[in-house]
Image (tube, coloured by chain):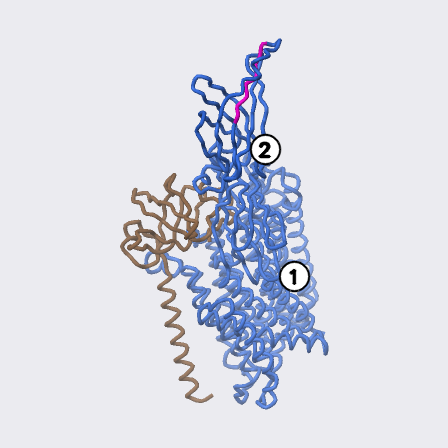
Chain colours: A blue, B brown
Amino acid sequence: MMNFGNLTMWLALIAICISSASYLVLNVKKNSTVARGAAHLSLFCFAILVTIASISLMYFILDHRFVYSYIARYSCRDLPLEYLISSFWAGQEGSFLLWVLLSSWLGLILISKARDMEPQVMLVYNLNNIFLMILLIKQSPFQMLSFTPVDGNGLNMLLQDPWMVIHPPVVFLGYAAFAIPFAFAVAALWRREYDRWVNAALPWTVFSFLTLGAGIFIGAYWSYKVLGWGGYWGWDPVENASLLPWLAGTALLHGMILQKVRGRLRKTNFVLAAFSFLLVIYCTFLTRSGVLADFSVHSFVELGITGWLVIFMFVFMAISIGLLVVRAKEIRSVKEAANIVSRESGFLAAIVLLSTSMVLIGLGTSAPLITRLFGNPSKVSTKFYVDTNLPVAIIVLLLLSLIPLLTWGANKVSKLAPRLIWPVTGGVVSGVVTLWNGFPGAGVFLLSLFAGAAVATNLFLSVKLIRKKTIASSAAIIHLGVGLVFVGIVSSSAYDRTQKVLLPQNILKNVMGHEMRFNGAAISTNTKGMWLHLPVSVKSGSHQFMARPDIYSERMRGGQIQRYAHPHIKRGLIRDLYLSPVEYEPGQKNAHSGSRFYLEKGKKIRFHDYELTFTGFDISGMMHRESSGSVSVGADILVSYKGGNPVKVKPVIRIGGTREETNKVKLPGPQQAYITLVKVDATAKAIGLAYEGPACAAKKDAERSCPALIAEISVKPGMSTLWLGALLILAGSTIGISRHWPK
Amino acid sequence: MSKKSYIIGGVVIVFAMVMAARSFKSTLTTYVTVKEAKMTDQPVQVAGIAVQGTKKYDFDRNVLIFTLREDSGDEMVVEYAGSKPANFDDVNKIVVIGKYAPQKQVFQARQLLVKCPTKYEGRVKGK
């Protein structure tokens, strides 16, 4: 249906096509100012139109126009502002729009940065935008329903987190940016200038590395914080979809630097640039087309854009392969005398290793597609990714601890030797600490050893370079970050201790050295569902805090219940305490409060932590019948708390009046526990008592009947190190952008 | 580069490829029935429902235990050490991935996925 939103998108498609056509003309008539003007103007219009489309979608969301199917599916009236905003990119259509939006803005910047390569660079870059626009029009966020729902479905609870507000824009900025090195690479092949493009494209490659990297880390952090399964990386296709182009981009980054500095790898860099961009499309295809629907728990559902994505992919593949084949012969790289011990070999190794890892992860992620060709579609388990990437990671870290110490060209061993003190010290320290905590197996031990060495080497270099010339320290800082990330990965995965525990209400339990007491459930509600707040007071050593995990459940349209368990994380410098609620058991109803029981005279019974003996009635109150006609009866009871000395208590009941009156009597012991005399049976010489107080005794058999929280408690060392490493990678690459920004 | 280094490089690459292929094959899991799962020692995935009232926790061994019943009516006991997906009790389909241990007569799940009949496309994880 043609409405305002769809109209702007069609106009945007037309604008970008005009821009591309003008660039085609400009490629033929090199100095046509008309063509150049038209290209710029239409590109500018494209960006404006896409921006208008985005603003109107955002406006419709904020204005709750549920007649738009997309808005009805992903937002609702009572969402707070920040999540109304993020519902823009909660689904497939909106996230494509976001992608195009960011891509169009980057395009405007790119015009001025491409300089004389502009006609070719922009043509390729525009082609990407044309495809995105086609996908977007096929899957328009402006599709309207035939009626207007009163309210929308709302935003998935899991996405209602500040990190998920910024995660998609950051990832799509990275996705959009990967088209730039590709555009430069194709332009370079076209123009037969095999070197110059590297200088122009390098800062953009670093930019893609930074943004996609940031997106990955934000996603991992969110997964750890929100999903409650205690991990940060699950090798899920959607996660791999951002990791694959990132690895390819990292390989490209190394290749480009090697070409810039030493004039090598001219051909390889074209391949890598093409690969990183094609992987963006391939991964979009994997996660958005529904081909993995059965295998990824969160790939977007099938929406019928598969065909377009495949065409999209093949066109770009044909362009890159075709051009490369045509030009391959004339591309010459500088041949150098082989210096095995040199920085160059390190760069080459980095490219090989990153590519290996990329191929392995790509293979694993594509497993359902590959195996479909031979029969039953199957997927690989996470073990595949871990097992195959472990040796790669070990070598990467080993190299990271040595190569940065080398210079370009030939290295003298005598000069190198004194510097080895750093990796050796780091490795030894890390090794000793690892062994101290228990041998984790040969592979992980090596990983930890070299991670420590890599940290030490790059810490030394970072400090040294920051002092000398900050801008030159980018690589050292990134590599330091990588080392720290791996230290974090090793310690949090090999030394994670997880325990499922039953925490009965108000009973102190020792869980891995922490005193924990579940304080009972509290309920709060909103219009859609309810929170079960499950506070647990935790005491570890002298430190005490209240953990507040909760379980949120809401009823869906179809009547099913959707549940979300929110963990509580107590962060620490060395280790995190992760408390994830699994289940709340309300317990047997009468065990909670006001439970009643009978006592026969002279018989001792156990109740919770108490032993009670009913010794006899006190009928002294019967002697003076009151005007109301009621009498008081007391019961003499001997109570001992946890086998302590018996204490005499006397609850009293006043009967016979207009209503019964009872008094509450506190039981001995430290707990706030009371009994009330509720029934007197003189013939059977028995009394009925009501109990109020802590529901549970520490007795094992009593545990099942009282309210309890089943929780998963884990101690995860190294998480702070991991996030610190991630931050350093991002900081280092930010410095890297300015380092390589063309002057 | 000398001929020798090419040969060494080639051997390393071939070795790595063989190892990767083996790992790929050995971790491939395909959907099977309960009957088939009990027959093989390969990791597999089985879909079914958790039979009501069979869910329990073994806190000493740190596992969640329940009986999985597939559409055909066949059942098996499943043991799972990971985190229980929050939606476990509400969904009508559960996929367990792991191996059957014949001597213990229990399916040891390494991964547990819930298929939720939800309107959302969002992620629900069970790892």
Q: Residue at x 58, y 21 (%)?
A: A662
The mark found on residue A220 in the picture is none
Local crowd size for mark 2, using a 10 Å CA cut-off: few (<14), some (14–19), many (≥20): few
Q: Which residue is mark 1?
A: A106
Q: Residue at x 36, y 49 (%)?
A: B78
In the image, residue A627 lies at what x, y percent?
62, 9
Residue A301 vs A195, above or below: the answer is above
The mark found on residue A150 in the picture is 2
Residue type indicated by callout 2 = Val
Residue type indicated by callout 1 = Leu
Q: CA distance from mark 2 to mark 1?
A: 38 Å
Task: Choose between A303 and A649: the one closer to the eye.
Answer: A649
Q: Report the span colored magenta.
A: A629-636
Is disc 2 in the same subunit as disc 1?
Answer: yes
Image check: A548 left or right of B10?
A: right
Magenta stretch: includes residue A491: no
Image check: A570 left or right of A395?
A: right
Task: Choose between A549 and A627: the one closer to the eye.
Answer: A627
What type of secondary structure mainly makes up the magenta span? strand
